[in-house]
Image (cartoon, helix red, strand yellow):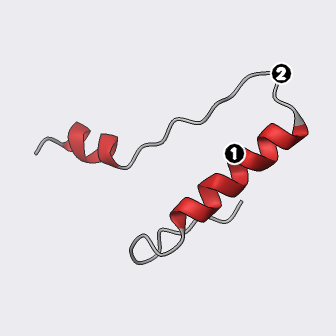
């Protein structure tokens, strides 16, 4: 496997633009946090 493929397997694309509402930002952050819990050692994010 190439290095770029390894990096791509760990990448995430987040919606980002100037018109996100507070509720949408909260949903994005909460979803990222929820999906990162218990996904291997040390991978949880803290936003």
Residue bearing the label numbered 1? 28
Q: Nearer the viewer, residue 3 or 20?
A: 20
Is 27 above or below relative to 43? above
Q: Earlier in the sequence, mark 1 or mark 2?
A: 2
Q: Residue at x 80, y 48 (%)?
A: 26
Q: Local crowd at mark 1 within 10 Å, few (<14), some, or many (≥20)?
A: some
Q: Nearer the viewer, residue 5 or 20?
A: 20
Task: Give how far across and how far down residue 42 sits, in percent.
Answer: 47, 75
Q: Is residue 40 left or right of residue 35?
A: left
Residue 13 marker = none
User: What is the quadrant of residue 15 in the picture?
Assistant: top right
Q: Residue at x 83, y 21 (%)?
A: 19
In three-dimensional space, the C-alpha distance between marks 1 and 2, rounded to whole angstroms, equals 14 Å
Residue bearing the label numbered 2? 19
Q: Residue at x 47, y 75 (%)?
A: 38
Quarter placement of the C terminus:
bottom right
């Amino acid at each position: 496997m190439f290095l770029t493929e390894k990096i791509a397997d760990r990448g995430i694309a987040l919606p980002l633009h100037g018109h996100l509402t507070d509720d949408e930002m909260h949903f994005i952050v909460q979803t990222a946090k929820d999906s990162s819990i218990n996904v291997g050692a040390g991978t949880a994010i803290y936003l």
